[in-house]
Amino acid sequence: RPADAHAIRSAFLSFFEERGHAAVPSSPLVPFDDPTLLFVNAGMVQFKDVFTGRDKRDYTRATSAQRCLRAGGKHNDLDNVGFTPRHHTLFEMLGNFSFGDYFKRDAIRWGWEFLTQVLELPAEKLVVSVFNGEGENAPFDQEAYDLWAEIIPKERIYAFDAKENFWQMGDTGPCGPCSEIHIWRGEGGAPPDGGKPGKGPAFEDDKYMELWNLVFMQYEKLASGEMTKLPAPSVDTGAGLERLAAVLEGVETNYETGLFVPIVDKVKALAGVSGHQGEREASYRVIADHARATAFLIADGVTPDQTGRPYVLRRIMRRAIRHATLVGLEDLFFHEVCDEVVNRFGEAYPELREAREVIAGAVKIEEEGFRRTLARGLRRVSKILAGLEAEGSKVFPVDEAADLYTSAGFPIDLTRVIAEENELTLDEAAVAEKLEAQKGESSFAGGGGSKVADVYFDIVNELGQGTAFLGYGATAGEATLK
Ligand code: ATP
Ligand code: MG
Ligand code: MG
Ligand code: MG
């Protein structure tokens, strides 16, 4: 059985090549000629038009290891990253595809075979789900249910509604009912029985980890909302490489696999710490994850800026740098973490090596700029705090918080944390309301829209989730922080 993620990737591609699939290289993260999609978020994206019949290839079966990004659009995992064991912004999706060739029987059979025979996962820990016919105009997937019933006990077959078991790339495009394979990671040898289809737990519980989604592409959603049948039933599957690695390496989270440990350790070395960092661990994970996304995005030609795709990259980079301030990383550091990503993934993805200098340069410039923004904001905050202290006020003014945000780009959640540290209250809902109103005005003002949007992004509390604020040390400048 494969020893690490790189071996899993090759084993997967060989397995499907042996079964008549053409091995197709990963496409870049920026979709080719597709304005409906921010980033490639699944292996099927580069085959979208092959499913609909608009594009023809000289193969009807394909397999790939596709780099994917889920930080915006329909599948947005940004806020989960670092806080769940299994979500990343950038990850690799292993997939096999049938374009009007084989359908459910082979997809299910091969998926099962790969997991239980090649990866040697214990069959009794695997559970599957099928579409129950609710939430989309498509019926209960009896066929998938019956096929699974030939392989595993019925108690391990669940049926869920469209939210879980009907897959679509975006608001338009090919889509269909899906069948997912999850692994039980709780106590005991096997999961509790699920009972009848349609009943049982949704696998949101961290005791289960979703490994593989088998999508039975049968429909296309049009911009009108109408759903039409595809020319031929097809298959699109996706399995997360980082998750397979976690299961095979016997670790609880993807961040403890060989894919992430070197990156996480690099960040810790720069911060002068080692070992598990308790409640701060999430920050190291966020930084490692975002460094991967940053390096791959820049290698694929995106550079940070104010709108669209470049803006998503900026947001990812700034989120990493804000987490860095939480763990006391005061100097420019992020380019070094991104360089470690190039070291680790350059062999599998040569485009990273080619872009090594470009990545380092762009990352340094962005970090310098954002650190200046933070320092400027902190100076203003310290003035506000001094004023409040003189007045004996215990309330951080809503107007000031909103203005820090819109005119200085200073993240609201940092204002909140600083307010808390100084035993002041901040009415965040009122700040959000105020910003919302300003955003509305600016979209009518013409030209100002994107600027406001640029600084608007942090209204959602991203650093929350139990992470305590450490203080800013040297970066704090004149801000009085306890
Ligand atoms: P989850 O329910 O865990 O969020 P999903 O149902 O959104 O996953 P799919 O859209 O079905 O995921 O994608 C196919 C596979 O890609 C998943 O089964 C999983 O192995 C992997 N995957 C999905 N999202 C991520 C992510 N953010 N990070 C890492 N792997 C992912
Ligand atoms: Mg998801
Ligand atoms: Mg899911
Ligand atoms: Mg899924």
Image (cartoon, helix red, strand yellow):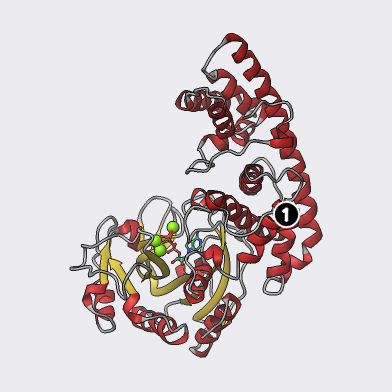
Please say if 134 is above or below 432.
below
Residue at coordinates 39% horizontally, 74% vertically from top-left?
A: 232
Residue 75 is situated, as x and y percent measured from the top left of the image, at 47, 54
Residue 434 is situated, as x and y percent measured from the top left of the image, at 51, 23
Judging depth in this view, the residue of 298 and 431 nearest the camera is 431
Residue at coordinates 62% horizontally, 45% vertically from top-left?
A: 323
Label 1 beta carbon less than 8 Å to ligand 1 = no
Amino acid of disc 1: Leu
- Quarter of the rendering containing residue 161: bottom left
Please say if 100 is above or below 419.
below
Judging depth in this view, the residue of 290 and 262 nearest the camera is 262
Judging depth in this view, the residue of 477 and 295 nearest the camera is 477
Residue 11 is situated, as x and y percent measured from the top left of the image, at 54, 84
Q: Residue furthest left?
A: 196
What is the number of callouts on the image?
A: 1
Disc 1 crowd rating (10 Å Cα; few below 14, some 14-19, many 20+) is: some
Residue at coordinates 67% horizontally, 56% vertically from top-left?
A: 268
Q: Secondary structure at mark 1?
A: helix
Residue 411 is situated, as x and y percent measured from the top left of the image, at 60, 33
In the rendered structure, the answer to whether residue 345 lies left or right of residue 126 reads right
Q: Is residue 58 visible?
A: no
Q: Residue furthest top?
A: 391
Q: Which residue is tagged 1?
A: 270
Q: Is residue 106 visible?
A: yes
Q: Quadrant of the C terminus?
A: top right
